[in-house]
Image: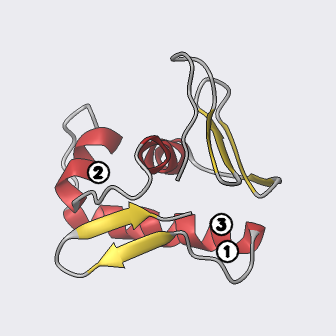
């Protein structure tokens, strides 16, 4: 997957996915996504490194920098919600893949 980013404030873009962290906006194949701040950070993490596998612990570190107490299953819940919203934007596609015992990755 090709990822374009020219500065820290530019939106992330990869094969139909747009993530603008500065303006808290995201879209998939032109359809706006209504994401929570945590879901937006999660999607941005995947969009920065399409194809890279992230463990639950790695995702927790990126999502919750304030060291609050959360379980690794919290990530599963956010992934489930994000998948549902991506499915709504583009039925039949699930760009977030699970790798049993390893983690998750974004494949566009």
- Toward the right, the furthest residue is 30
**Residue 85 circle label:** 3
Pointer 3 or 2: first along the chain: 2
Rendering coords of residue 46 (x, y %): 44, 50
Q: Residue at x 45, y 40 (%)?
A: 48
Nearest the camera: 72 or 44? 44
Residue that mark 2 sits on: 59
Badge 3 vs badge 2, beta-carbon distance below 8 Å? no
**Residue 105 circle label:** none
Relative horizontal placement of residue 75, taking residue 47 as reference (left or right): left
Q: Find the distance from the CA under tag 1 to the CA under tag 3.
A: 5 Å
Q: Find the distance from the CA under tag 1 to the CA under tag 2.
A: 21 Å
Rendering coords of residue 22 (x, y %): 61, 23
Q: Secondary structure at mark 1?
A: helix
Q: Secondary structure at mark 2?
A: helix
Rendering coords of residue 7 (x, y %): 54, 16
Residue that mark 1 sits on: 87
Q: Residue at x 62, y 22 (%)?
A: 10
Badge 1 vs badge 3, beta-carbon distance below 8 Å? yes
Rendering coords of residue 17 (x, y %): 66, 51
Q: Residue at x 63, y 51 (%)?
A: 35
| Label 3 Cα crowd, 10 Å radius (few <14 / some 14-19 / many 20+) | some
Q: Secondary structure at mark 3?
A: helix
Q: Find the distance from the CA under tag 3 to the CA under tag 2.
A: 19 Å
């Amino acid at each position: 997957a090709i990822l374009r980013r020219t500065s820290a404030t530019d939106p992330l873009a990869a094969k139909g996915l747009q993530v603008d962290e500065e303006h808290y906006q995201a879209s998939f194949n032109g359809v706006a996504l209504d994401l929570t701040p945590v879901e937006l950070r999660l999607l941005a993490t995947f969009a920065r490194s399409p194809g890279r596998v992230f463990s639950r612990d790695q995702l927790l570190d990126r999502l919750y920098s304030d060291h609050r107490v959360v379980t690794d299953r919290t990530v599963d819940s956010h992934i489930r919600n994000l998948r549902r919203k991506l499915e709504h934007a583009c039925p039949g596609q699930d760009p977030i893949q699970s790798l049993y015992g390893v983690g998750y990755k974004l494949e566009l």
